[in-house]
Amino acid sequence: MIPTILVAVFGLLVTFIVTFIVMPYVIKAMKKRNIVGVDVHKVDKPKVAEMGGVGILLGVTVGSLVLFVLAGIFVTGFFDLRILVFLSVVLIAGFIGIVDDVKTLGAKFKPILTAAACLPILLYTWTIIGLGLSPPLLPAYIPNPHMPFLGRTRLTFVYPWLVPLAIAIPANSMNMMDVFNGVMPLTSILMFVALLIVSLFLMAVGIPGAELGVLLSAVMIGALIAYYAFNRYPAKVFAGDTGSLAVGAALGAVAIMGRVEIMAIVALLPAIMNAFYSLVSIGGLLERRQMKARPTIFQEDGTLAASQDANAPLTLTRLVLARGPMTEQRITLSLATLTFASSILAVLTLLLIPFDTEYLITWPFTLILVIVPICLILGVYLVLRKTDHLGFRLAGLITIMVGVWTLGMAGFALLDFLLFYIQSPYWPIAGILYMVGWLALWHFATRLYFRYEMGKNKAVNQLVS
């Protein structure tokens, strides 16, 4: 375990240094070629270099190659081709982003292309299994994910069909989140840190593939910290689709190859919430220029406010602003706070997974773990909801997110009960009905929260005027 941690730390440092060194050259090159974008959330509308994701790709490439060599010498005893598979996924997603930055791809075509970035994972796994090369070579995915309450499941025939979604969903979700200075790197760092913590624990209990999650998460953290230095407010560079698609695809690849699928989904909850709200409110996939109205309004004092237009998409940012205008820096901090909460939930999810038929914690403690935080958040929100402190301002959204997580975990508990206790043959139907109800309740609670906060904000404005 110690060699793995040392190699991971070294890989993080190498990736950070390379990304930090090349980023100024990337910025200079993009400005020279007039590849710039207008920072619309600034009063003076400055032009900022685009496609900073190229610097991230260069850093991750060097860091992954260093890991490939060092892990082969000090960790596994052989050169693990899965690291190169991971790098291939990131580079393919990054190349798709480059094409989209240069020549805009359609809103419906881009998710299909990013799903194709999973091909290295599938082809590598099928090849080594088909040729009988495993072991010593290890497959890039194992179709037996560990689920809360259910433990290790067997999805031999279903899992390969889920792999494209596992790449496309985080890639496009991160792309939709990357709208403010510093948001994409800051939230991504928190997610990868959560996966790093989870992977370290899984490695300690002997889960195969966990060491790969540690190494790959460390590489991405190094690149993103370096990029954040240039993308934080006021941004000197934007990642573009080149960076956001690559980072999202990397998150999906780490989830699959590190065997932390469920924890990655939970960590990604704010980005998934943002995508879910947008898709439901506008009725499908649309490019930003195709939307009838923008979700936020930039005001003369430099703050942003939630749009009152009924045609505006219901994004996570619009929900954050429902209580009143905020500066761009505060919005970035808000989205990072929500991601920090989801990252904690991702680590807590690990405690609900039985390894070797034994839970890591007892059932009574599980109930306390779930119920007490919800009660505390609701209590704080009800008592201090009139204050403008950031933590209390986000209490409603954090409550919704915790509720979504709790109901999701309850769904796994229901399947566990139907499958193993009463052995009902109707568990697939019950699972589908539960999921539909879960999504409907999620959407209803969000719309109710938004209408309540917007109505209260409107009443306050009328009273002041």
Image (tube, grey):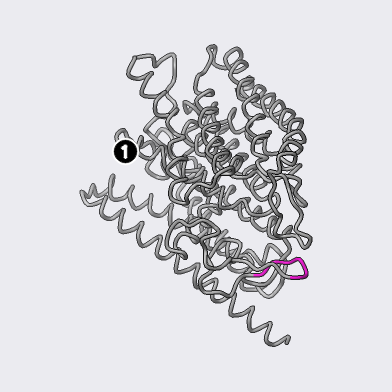
Observer-nearest of 432 and 311: 311
Considering the image in quadrants, where does the C terminus appear?
Answer: bottom right
Magenta stretch encompasses residue 302? yes
428 vs 246, nearest the viewer: 246
Q: Is residue 392 above or below residue 166?
A: below
> Regarding mark 1 in the picture, which secondary structure is present there?
loop
Q: Residue pushed farthest left?
A: 425
**Residue where numbered disc 1 is placed:** 158
- For badge 1, the amino acid type reads Val
Could you tell me residue 330's position as x and y percent?
72, 60
* Quadrant assignment for the N terminus: top right
Query: Callout 1 environment at 10 Å: few (<14), some (14 to 19), or many (20+)?
Result: few
User: Percent position (x, y) of residue 165?
Assistant: 42, 42
Does residue 322 appear to the left or right of 349 in the view shown?
Answer: right
Task: Reply yes or no: does residue 151 show up in magenta.
Answer: no
Picture layout, residue 338 above or below residue 306: above
Nearer to the camera, 36 or 53: 36
Residue 458, image x and y in percent?
63, 81
Residue 367 in percent (x, y) is at 48, 55
Name which residue lies at 64% across and 20% down. 66
When the figure is inspected, residue 213 is found, relative to residue 103, above or below; the finding is: above
Front position in the image: 84 or 245: 245
Start and end of the magenta stretch?
Answer: 300-305
> Which of the 4 image quadrants contains residue 289?
bottom right
**Count of numbered circles in the view:** 1
Give the main secondary structure of the magenta stretch: loop
In the image, 426: left or right of 218?
A: left
